[in-house]
Image (spheres, rainbow, N blue to C red):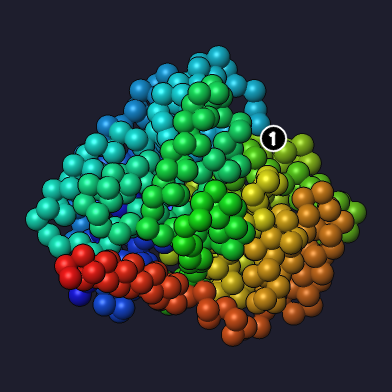
């Protein structure tokens, strides 16, 4: 088989959405005649740990784990937060910060460039270079964020001449919280130069949505491939679901202050108190920002909202599958039309309707419409939010069920189909390299 070296900071036992993309590539690449070798961190600064994901790694996968400098312990002590919270990019909150927190964020924003995982770079580069020297590698893939992994990919590409794909799960300087970071002007310019260097020098770039492809294409003339995240049918086998006596609205994943759906809480308050829909229960599964907890109290919803800490991946899928309605929140920012949360694909295959709050002309809205799987409402449109919840609540009261019909369009978003796209891109780069080698030889 041809061999691909995949550089990814997030890999099991790390939990969270960033892990799934690379884990599933590793699972299915051999079906397309590519052997994956994973270069990852040994003990990373992970916001969540999920040991159950380790069992999904194919047993014969070559995994190279290296040390890393970890500034998060010091950062956590200085800012006065837990290390797991310090490791999360979602530290940005709507609440007022203490002086220590402000100083800690300034240090993080201006010292650790491009991100706080840059401490892994020297170990990853040295280990990757040593592995390539001893073993044949046909293509390199770096997957970010953290975007510091692209620094490793770029240097290995320049050192070895091996084709390199920079895989962007999120934008870099166009990410929602970038302008909120307390960076000095020089550091902002440095980020822009680093991003441009990666985009310009990568052999190819893969992104997770069509809108982000257009966004990054404006910065470089490179070749792009849209490779969605998707879902794995195997993950939905033997789910331990439970029967609920209430109308369950679930959100799976972290809820940062910037994603606080104020109009959703207002709509719920109206439905409960004016429409007497008192059998509603909202489950927030994952880390929840204090500003959201404050909004729940503000609208007198404490009795109707359950906050559940991070669940192991399969258990989270089970809670999707026994919900009445699934909540998808895309915060309003300039590049948000390209935001397709990874959970959306799993929401689709769970066959539960989705209430999206975000851009109605964005990529996520297009997928919802294509699969006839729910409704996307603008952030400020609490009437539309309340109307969709009421419609489904009434259906649930009458039939006890809100499941949607299976839609064949969902099938294109399987993890295996998306891995086929990656394999096609890998083959293209491999063939280009072989042609170049043959031309040079003759």
Residue 397 seen: no
| Foreground pick, 121 / 233 | 121
Say which quarter of the image contains residue 385: bottom right
Measuring from the top left, give residue 182's x and y in whole percent: 56, 24
Q: Could you tell me which secondary element the residue under label 1 belongs to?
A: helix
Q: Is residue 36 above or below residue 85?
A: below
Residue of label 1:
294
Q: Residue furthest right?
A: 274
394 left or right of 81?
A: right
For image coordinates 55% across by 74% down, the residue present is 349
Residue depicted at x 68% and y 46%: 334
Residue at 41 percent across and 31 percent down: it is: 113
- What crowding class fits label 1: few (fewer than 14 Cα within 10 Å), some (14-19), or many (20 or more)? few
Q: Residue at x 53, y 34 (%)?
A: 91
Among all residues in the image, which is located at the extreme front? 442
Specify whether residue 175 is in view.
yes
Left or right: 193, with 356 as reference point: left
Which corner quadrant holds the C terminus? bottom left
The relative height of residue 210 versus residue 382 in the rendered view (above or below) is below
Quadrant location of the N terminus? bottom left
From the viewer's side, name the closer residue of 203 and 105.
203
Question: Where does the image place residue 200, in percent across and percent down from the top left?
Answer: 44, 49
Q: Is the residue 202 above or below the residue 355 in the image?
A: above
């Amino acid at each position: 088989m041809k061999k691909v070296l995949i550089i990814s900071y997030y890999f099991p036992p790390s939990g969270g959405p960033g892990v799934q993309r690379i884990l599933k590539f590793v699972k299915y690449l051999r079906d397309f005649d590519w052997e994956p070798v994973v270069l990852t961190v040994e003990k990373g600064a992970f916001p969540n740990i999920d040991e159950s994901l380790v069992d999904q790694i194919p047993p014969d996968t070559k995994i190279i784990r290296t040390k890393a400098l970890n500034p998060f312990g010091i950062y956590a002590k200085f800012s006065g937060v837990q290390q797991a919270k310090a490791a999360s990019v979602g530290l940005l909150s709507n609440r007022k910060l203490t002086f220590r927190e402000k100083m800690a964020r300034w240090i993080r924003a201006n010292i650790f460039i491009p991100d706080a995982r840059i401490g892994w770079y020297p170990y990853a580069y040295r280990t990757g270079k040593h592995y390539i020297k001893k073993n044949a590698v046909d293509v390199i893939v770096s997957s970010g964020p953290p975007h510091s992994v692209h620094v490793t990919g770029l240097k290995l590409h320049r050192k070895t001449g091996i084709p390199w794909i920079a895989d962007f799960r999120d934008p870099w300087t166009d990410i929602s919280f970038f302008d909120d970071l307390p960076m000095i002007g020089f550091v902002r310019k440095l980020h822009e130069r680093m991003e441009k260097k990666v985009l310009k020098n990568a052999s190819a770039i893969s992104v997770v949505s069509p809108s982000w492809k257009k966004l990054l294409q404006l910065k470089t003339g490179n070749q792009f491939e849209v490779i969605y995240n998707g879902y794995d049918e195997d993950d939905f086998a033997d789910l331990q679901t439970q029967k609920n006596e209430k109308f369950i609205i679930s959100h799976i994943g972290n809820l940062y202050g910037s994603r606080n759906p104020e109009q959703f809480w207002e709509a719920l308050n109206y439905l409960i108190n004016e429409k007497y829909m008192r059998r509603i229960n909202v489950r927030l599964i994952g880390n929840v920002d204090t500003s959201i907890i404050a909004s729940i109290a503000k609208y007198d919803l404490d009795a109707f909202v359950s906050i559940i800490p991070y669940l192991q991946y399969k258990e989270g899928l089970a809670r999707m599958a026994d919900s009445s309605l699934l909540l998808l929140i895309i915060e309003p920012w300039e590049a948000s039309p390209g935001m397709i949360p990874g959970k959306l694909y799993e929401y689709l295959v769970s066959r539960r309707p989705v209430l999206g709050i975000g851009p109605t002309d964005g990529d996520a809205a297009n997928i919802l419409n294509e699969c006839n799987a729910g409704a996307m409402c603008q952030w400020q449109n609490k009437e539309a939010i309340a109307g969709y919840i009421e419609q489904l609540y009434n259906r649930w009261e009458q039939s006890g069920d809100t499941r949607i019909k299976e839609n064949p369009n969902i099938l294109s978003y399987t993890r295996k189909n998306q891995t086929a796209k990656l394999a096609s891109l890998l083959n293209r780069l491999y063939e280009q390299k072989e042609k170049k080698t043959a031309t040079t030889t003759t």
